[in-house]
Image (cartoon, helix red, strand yellow):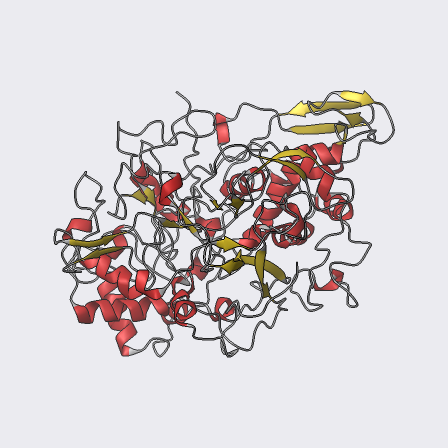
Amino acid sequence: MKIRHLIPIAGLVSTGVFAQRGGNGGGAPIGSLKAVAVPQPPGLERYVRDQGAAIALGKALFWDAQVGSDGRTACATCHFHAGADHRLRNQLSSPHDAVAAIRPNHILTAGEFPFHVLENPLDNRSAVLRDDRQVVGSAGVISRNFYDVVPGSAFDEGVETSGRNAFEIGGIKVRQVTPRNTPTVINSVFNVLNFWDGRASDIFTGATPFGDSDPGFHALGGSGRRLDRERVRIENASLASQAAGPALNDVEMSYGGRTWAKLGKKILALSPLAGQWVATDDSVLGGMANPESTGLLPEYGYDALIRAAFQPAYWGSALVVDSSGGVVEDVGSPRNSNEFTQMEFNFSLFWSLAIQAYEATLVSDDSRFDRFAEGNRAALTALEQLGMQEFQSGGSQCTQCHQGPEFTAASFTNRARRRPNGLNPDDFGFFRTGVSPISEDVGAGATDGFGIPLFPSARIGSANGVFKSPGLRNVEFTGPYFHDGGQATLEQVMEFYARQGDFPGGGNLGPGIGRIRLTAPERTALVAFMKALTDDRVRFERAPFDHPALCIPIGHGELAPGVLRVNDSNPGSPLTGSDDWALIPATGKDGNPVPLQTFEELLLGIGQDGSRAHSLAKSCVP
């Protein structure tokens, strides 16, 4: 039986500063995140020659909308807001992908939350008044099959998929939506496994998220007249595994069937961040930014960034290869789109390791709670301190799942502290919490892209319906909440836990859920404490959370209710709805003068006057 996941190394264990108060809250003590070392993949120098250059490359790739097959979808399109997504329109999906169940292009409203409404909101066995089993995901790309790249163009050639698609209105296609809510990438470097179901392995094998399940040889190394296919295996590298997923995913960023070599051929022919403004005081890219126009200065092309970041053994050969890595020409240039340079062929390696390098810098360890934990007792109000005590108590059971300085049991420090012999989901911080019926979404009970169970050593059925426990830092800005996005506010989340989950049947309750006891004042104090976990650098997008500008799609224009405006900017796609766009402006190292908008504020229209960042009120042309 294959084992996908590395038992994490020792030496990453952090000592929290607060013992558990009030009884059996469970879990490692909470404390300042500054005390936790950022996990480092061992042996990375085999591939990376300059970590700073890799960070710059990763930031450019993460924010570049040219990566998407439509030339308009970046990683950041779904991670632009405190590392997450808070768009309102065309964000609904279905856990069953049922065509009839999805409401394409719907605009979410405050009155629709929470999705599961009970006659008594504190009793999960009371009468159900509403049960909307849709999911708030993230809008990705239009459904098409990949045909080829177009030299020098950000737009891939695609052919229309046949048959009825769930994401269409009156025969006009809209952007597809992911089947789960988007988690934040901030502090994700501390997770042993990533994605809600843990399919991003802590072992990166070069081209897919699935670790040792993937038997492929995904790197082409060597020099001169010899290149060899190599097997990549890098430990403590879940962020690289995660990065390998969306770029070729046919819902999130890619037309179906695109390959890494084709993506490399496309991107290496383009100017980084072309059409997107980069602040000249960007904390990473500022020195490369074009002060007179969009993108980076001409000398900072993607080929130059890769050369600076990675070892020449993975890009320096003049040989030309085919899609399998076989040499077709000793010296020269590819003659067609099915021949590749070594750099193009190895693009999955560069992409994944660079984005991992960038995301590893997104650590928010300077909240008011961190300052309190470091000795500044004036950093938290009396109510927030009361909430902190309740957070650690047996009544709330919070630290069963949200423990340690990372506020998640899914962290390296928790895994190293427990050192279990098995590989069951709860050992990795994956639990059942009564968010959705097991039959609706099996979570970590699924198989990976090679048909191997995500947790192959788990007890039979123990992985069904479990999901990664998310960290709570900056949770004020990462709504809507849970893997289904079914709660709009932290107050609704507290009511959810006070009723011990929405679905008590089916054995889908994790440790401590059935023992939660929360009064109204305790819930208020807990919400206050969780908001004290926000780092002001995230709140105002200060370095390292500054970024290039990005135009994001916010739904499709309608001529009348249910009548889509057809895309007139792409004659090759007459059956595609026209996007509406909102600008996420570029920020430099000093960030915004106003704070980010919460999801609740967006629902209520608060911040449209410019008092909030990311209110999605300013239109743009991508």
Q: Position of residue 596 (x, y in %)?
A: 48, 70
Q: Is residue 1 above or below residue 337?
A: above
Q: Position of residue 16 (x, y in %)?
A: 34, 58
Determine whether, in the image, residue 395 is placed left or right of residue 588: left
Residue nearest the observer in this picture, 277 or 162:
162
Q: Quadrant of residue 22?
A: bottom left
Residue nearest the observer in this picture, 612 or 326:
612
Residue nearest the observer in this picture, 211 or 166:
166
Q: Is residue 245 above or below residue 516?
A: above
Whether residue 450 appears in this view of the structure is yes
Residue nearest the observer in this picture, 29 or 553:
553
Q: Is residue 534 above or below residue 329?
A: below
Q: Position of residue 389 (x, y in %)?
A: 24, 66
Q: Position of residue 403 (x, y in %)?
A: 32, 54
Q: Residue at x 49, y 41 (%)?
A: 238
- Quadrant including the N terminus: top left
Q: Residue furthest right?
A: 332
